[in-house]
Image: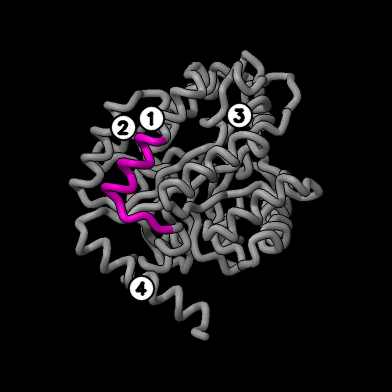
Amino acid sequence: MKPASSTLTERIAQSSAESSESGKVLASISVDVDVVSCYYRAYGINACDGNQVYDLAMPRLMSLFEEFGIRATFFVVAKDVRNHPQNAQIIRRLAESGHEIANHTLSHPFRLTRLPLEIKANEIAEAEPILSELSGQPVTGFRSPGWDIDADLMSILEDRGYEYDSSVFPSFFLLPLKLQHRLKNWNLETTTGMGSPWFSFAPTRPYHPNGQTPWKRGSRRLLEIPIGVVPDVRIPFLGTVLFGAGWSFFRASLEWVVFRRQPFNFELHPIELLGLAEDGLDARLERQPGMRLSLSRKLVLYRQLLTILKYRCHLVTMCEMAKQFRLQGVR
């Protein structure tokens, strides 16, 4: 039997060759598994979470990925699966199906960068054994809630041997998004940080960050795989935009990404596969992009999305993408 590292290296080499020969752009689909209570907290809604993300949305998403033969990376909040056997079983099934399980902190704190250094470290470290036990693999990737990252968090990840972070949002729309979220929710405790405004100017392709100014290229071992944006104009390129701006805008954005040969990770959220009325969510959650669409319409959009991504992109997990860029010696 070949060592696991050898098998992964061969898979990465094959992936690189296939991507080059087919003319497809290298991409990953990532999923932030945020439960409904995260959104209730973010919008200041006092309502109970009926576990709809794990009971309803995740099975729908898993079925779609199986239908299209897609392996994705799931960023999981550890407390949502700790002492929740049914939720934990979902994560086990994902890992058994070849999906990557990555760290989305222990408890999904808003404004993570504002917390004391010890709490930051605990949020990362205490999630690891929970997630690795369910996946059967070491946890090598991290995404901060609300894309809220700083140099201290990157140092913690580097010290703990992480391969990559995926929290930098290099979009000129970062400040408007911060303002929009602030206007929707006046509770400072649950307003997402989204990192420093300087990240608007960070590289849009995977890079090794600078130690103290992580929006610049540097010499860290940690690889940063930024949130997807449209090259040149830096418009956000993720699932929320599909549901907020519509199919035509998404398709035009994808065509430019492919034309510019920009490797990217496309971020999704399971709540996008919940119906506001159909799945018993609080009506006040209609403020979330896409929540006014019917569930049937969202399923149609998801099938269109996965069809075109599968056709135009060579899809790999984010761990595989990180290792491929390391082999290429990216800076």
Q: Which residue is mark 4?
A: 327
Q: Looking at the image, which residue sits at the far right?
A: 83
Q: Looking at the image, which residue sits at the far top?
A: 283
In percent of the image, x 42 and y 34: which residue is there? Answer: 302
Along the viewing direction, whichever of 303 and 24 lies nearer the viewer: 303
Check whether the beta carbons of the residues at disc 2 and disc 1 lie within 8 A of each other: yes
Along the viewing direction, whichever of 173 and 87 lies nearer the viewer: 87
Q: Nearer the viewer, mark 2 or mark 4?
A: 2
| Element carrying mark 4 | helix
User: Of the residues shown, which amino acid type is indicated by label 1?
Assistant: Leu
Q: Crowdedness of circle 3 by 10 Å Cα count: few (<14), some, many (20+)?
A: many
Q: Give the numbered dot on residue 250.
A: 2
> Up-down: is 6 above or below 35?
below
Q: Crowdedness of circle 4 by 10 Å Cα count: few (<14), some, many (20+)?
A: few
In percent of the image, x 74 and y 19: which residue is there? Answer: 46
Cα gap from disc 4 to disc 3, whole angstroms: 38 Å
Cα gap from disc 2 to disc 3, whole angstroms: 27 Å
Q: Give the numbered dot on residue 109.
A: none
The location of residue 25, given as percent across then percent down, is: 27, 53
User: Of the residues shown, which amino acid type is indicated by label 4?
Assistant: Leu
Is residue 286 shown in magenta?
Answer: no
203 relative to 117 in the view: left or right: left
User: Of the residues shown, which amino acid type is indicated by label 3?
Assistant: Thr
Q: Earlier in the sequence, mark 2 or mark 3?
A: 3
The image quadrant that residue 206 belongs to is bottom left
Cα gap from disc 2 to disc 4, whole angstroms: 31 Å
Check whether the beta carbons of the residues at disc 2 and disc 4 lie within 8 A of each other: no
Q: Give the numbered dot on residue 191.
A: 3
The location of residue 167, given as percent across then percent down, is: 49, 48
Is residue 306 shown in magenta?
Answer: yes
The location of residue 41, given as percent across then percent down, is: 68, 27
Residue range of the region highlighted in magenta in the rendering: 303-316
